Image: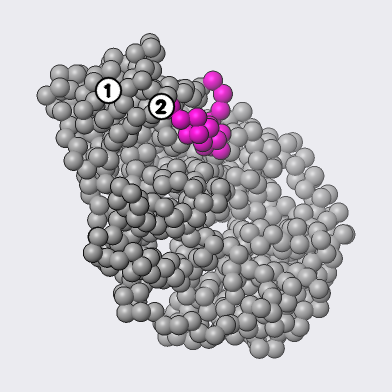
């Protein structure tokens, strides 16, 4: 068994995880743009052959520190390359570098190539040559924070290249993205139940061919002639031939049973001729009907149920974008009128294009076609989906709120896309009249009202909340049932929260390549503090090789991050059974179970007194005040933090680190009391994410290193 990495376009990580588990992976954990997998060489071969979603399969050869190009060169040269490549063989090197002293991808790749070549020259008196197209061995370097991971690219070339494409239109859809669209739309189930498939803007036929191969069970790598392991010395020829023979037999059987239930059309005869050639090369021409006509002349559905799926133009070219909304409106009208009872899936350029369809979406997914961000809209087609009367106009204040939300999204979008962030704060009391926070949890919204001044009548404040809900629903394209609202009302003792959409409903969201359960409706807090995103990332960075203690563990998100960062053990301590159960499920959701991940129902100070273990990393994020019935003493963070941190010092290993955070606005760290035990670094500014820039006092954070 070995750990290896399977990359994919962003947005497909969870689909790929499930696919790899179905292929036989013992464990699979999603990360940004890929999945870390545990399995043997047979599983890696199966991924190359059978994965519809993967881009590359990377088999690790070595990992080492590379603080500069000399260390990188030495680390690569130290590998016994005679085990992997013949002296007269060929190689190519790809490199991706981030936050390291070596800053350029091409330079890093050159240093890797030099090290391999020099190794052979010194050992064999001969050296391999470079072949960037079809090398015997393609190496992949990931250099992040001066840590190098060098892998063999078993795929050799991107796996979305299936081997059948004879031509393509101006904006080709990658095959693995097409497969993701079909899986999100539930095409395999619909085909099994007798449904048909129509693509009214089929272009060169990518969606049609992927749908046919999926229905017939044809391995997407079966037609490929080249893989990156074919010239690799440890390549198991017998194993690979057996797997290919099994896949070929499965494809033959699947084609015999395949129903001719797929049809496509396009307005461009030239691109339709390419679709015909591609279908022929893919071996499915006899199962696909292709016709030339525009959207207005799409025929009425010939089957009672099925999937109508398409990838219309996005209008990315100058001068084209103005005509795109009309195209989407016409597409939506035709689908509603001619495919009632069908399922629809349209890959749009953005939310505005999705809105122009005039359908109520059940699901929305952000996907990437290369570097281009797209939105997949999935919906059921009913006659009732016809556009309704125009809604009443927004008030002047509500329009200002809409403008501000759109501005915030434009400002945040680049960073969110770059870092793969799907849960974030989009609005935070930016306009005084709309005193609320709006948080995005993937395709849900969490709207929380702040305390309104006494001078604002409750009826006015409530009306503004209702306006904010409507505006947020329109701007984010989220239906009302996916907006959780927490609204204050006045009662004895002043303002307090009294109105919540209590539904008992949990949803699963992603952050940092991990998955978490959140409840947006039933409690004040959701289970995932969005402002602590950089703090959690810091814990993952610090946790490798250490035992980790999480006091006031809440829902265990910090423990999940520490486990993902390589902590040898995590211990999560909290007094609440509800939170510990939540933490247990969060850990299990990410594959962290067993004796290495313990949960303890205990008061923090009692645990520190009674536990005799030592930890390399401790995280302390206490409440401002607590008077739990399960504890004999109450807790006040300002009064008691010095004693708490002193007790933690007794549990730290030499050179251990404590990350201390709290959200009491008027908090003052007692430097005098703790500086004798700790070197103190105020990390508060660095711990506030950019989407919380308006609330720099939302929490405090220190890194305390044991002296």
Could you tell me residue 362's position as x and y percent?
60, 64
| Quadrant in the picture for the N terminus | top right
Of labels 2 and 1, earlier in sequence is: 2
Q: Is residue 33 left or right of residue 451?
A: right
Mark 2 vs mark 1: give the one in front. 2
Q: Is residue 175 left or right of residue 152?
A: right
Task: Specify the label residue 197 is tagged with.
Answer: none
Could you tell me residue 305's position as x and y percent?
78, 70
Queried whether the magenta region covers residue 587, the answer comes back as yes
Residue found at x 33% / y 31%: 626
Specify few, some or many for label 1: CA neighbours under 10 Å numbering under 14, 14-19, or 20 or more.
some
Q: Is residue 152 left or right of residue 433?
A: right
Q: Which residue is mark 2?
A: 629
Relative height, residue 419 to residue 78 (above, below): below
Q: Which residue is mark 1?
A: 644
Could you tell me residue 429's position as x and y percent?
28, 61
First to last magenta residue range: 573-595
Relative height, residue 233 to residue 676 (above, below): below
- Say how many tags the image has: 2
Q: For this rendering, which residue is in front, 34 or 609?
A: 609
Specify few, some or many for label 2: CA neighbours under 10 Å numbering under 14, 14-19, or 20 or more.
few
Q: CA distance from mark 2 to mark 1?
A: 20 Å
Q: Is residue 73 left or right of residue 317?
A: left
Residue found at x 77% / y 54%: 217
Residue 567: quadrant of the picture: top left
Q: For this rendering, which residue is in front, 531 or 632?
A: 632
Mark 1 element type: helix
The figure's colour scheme reads one colour
């Amino acid at each position: 068994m070995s750990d290896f990495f399977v990359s994919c376009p962003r947005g497909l990580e969870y689909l790929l995880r499930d696919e790899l588990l179905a292929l036989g992976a013992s464990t699979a954990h999603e990360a940004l743009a890929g999945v870390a997998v545990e399995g043997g060489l047979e599983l890696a071969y199966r991924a190359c052959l059978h994965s519809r979603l993967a881009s590359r399969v990377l088999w690790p050869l070595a990992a080492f520190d590379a603080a500069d190009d000399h260390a990188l060169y030495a680390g690569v040269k130290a590998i016994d390359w005679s085990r992997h490549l013949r002296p007269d063989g060929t190689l190519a090197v790809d490199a991706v570098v981030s936050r390291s002293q070596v800053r350029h991808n091409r330079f890093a790749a050159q240093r890797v190539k030099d090290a391999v070549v020099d190794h052979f020259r010194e050992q064999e008196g001969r050296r391999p040559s470079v072949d960037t197209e079809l090398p015997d061995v393609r190496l992949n370097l990931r250099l992040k924070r001066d840590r190098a991971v060098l892998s063999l690219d078993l795929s050799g070339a991107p796996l979305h290249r299936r081997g059948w494409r004879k031509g393509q239109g101006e904006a080709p859809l990658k095959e693995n993205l097409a497969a993701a669209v079909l899986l999100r739309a539930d095409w395999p189930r619909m085909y099994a139940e007798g449904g048909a498939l129509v693509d009214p803007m089929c272009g060169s036929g990518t969606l049609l061919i992927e749908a046919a191969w999926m229905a017939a069970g044809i391995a997407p790598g079966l037609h490929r002639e080249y893989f990156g392991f074919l010239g690799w010395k440890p390549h198991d020829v017998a194993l690979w031939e057996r797997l290919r023979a099994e896949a070929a037999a499965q494809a033959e059987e699947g084609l015999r049973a395949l129903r001719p239930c797929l049809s496509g059309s396009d307005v461009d005869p030239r691109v339709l001729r390419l679709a015909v050639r591609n279908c022929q090369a893919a071996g499915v021409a006899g199962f696909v009907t292709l016709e030339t006509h525009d959207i207005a002349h799409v025929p009425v559905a010939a089957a009672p149920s099925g999937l109508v799926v398409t990838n219309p133009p996005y209008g990315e070219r100058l001068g084209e974008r103005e005509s795109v909304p009309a195209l989407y409106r016409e597409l939506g009208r035709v689908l509603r009128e001619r495919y009632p009872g069908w399922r629809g899936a349209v890959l749009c350029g953005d939310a505005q294009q999705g809105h122009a369809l005039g359908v109520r979406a059940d699901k929305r997914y952000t996907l990437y076609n290369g570097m281009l961000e797209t939105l997949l809209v999935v919906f059921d087609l009913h006659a009732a989906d016809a556009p309704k009367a125009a809604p009443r106009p927004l008030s002047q204040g509500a329009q200002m709120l809409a403008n501000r939300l759109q501005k915030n999204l434009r400002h945040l979008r680049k960073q969110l896309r770059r870092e793969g962030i799907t849960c974030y704060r989009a609005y935070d009391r930016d306009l005084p009249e709309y005193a609320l926070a709006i948080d995005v949890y993937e395709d849900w919204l969490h709207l929380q009202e702040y305390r309104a001044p006494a001078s604002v009548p409750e009826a006015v404040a409530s009306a503004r909340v209702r306006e904010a809900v409507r505006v947020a629903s329109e701007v984010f394209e989220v239906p009302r049932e996916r907006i959780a609202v927490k609204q204050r009302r006045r009662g004895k003792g002043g303002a307090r929260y009294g109105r919540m959409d209590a539904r008992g409903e949990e949803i699963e969201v992603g952050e940092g390549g991990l998955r978490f359960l959140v409840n947006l409706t039933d409690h004040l807090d959701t289970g995932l503090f969005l402002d602590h995103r950089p703090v959690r990332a810091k814990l993952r960075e610090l946790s490798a090789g250490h035992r980790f203690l999480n006091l006031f563990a809440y829902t265990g998100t910090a423990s999940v991050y520490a486990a993902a960062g390589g902590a040898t053990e995590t211990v999560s301590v909290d007094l609440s059974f509800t939170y510990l159960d939540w933490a247990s499920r969060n850990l299990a959701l990410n594959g962290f179970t067993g004796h290495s991940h313990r949960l303890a129902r205990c008061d923090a100070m009692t645990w520190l007194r009674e536990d005799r273990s030592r930890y390399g990393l401790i995280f302390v994020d206490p409440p401002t005040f607590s008077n739990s019935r399960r504890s004999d003493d109450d807790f006040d963070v300002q009064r008691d933090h010095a004693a708490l941190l002193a007790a933690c010092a007794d549990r730290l290993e030499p050179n251990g680190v404590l990350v201390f955070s709290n959200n009491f606005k008027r908090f003052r760290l007692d430097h005098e009391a703790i500086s004798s035990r700790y070197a103190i670094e105020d990390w508060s500014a660095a711990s506030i994410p950019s989407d919380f820039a308006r609330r720099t006092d939302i929490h405090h954070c220190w890194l305390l290193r044991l002296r």
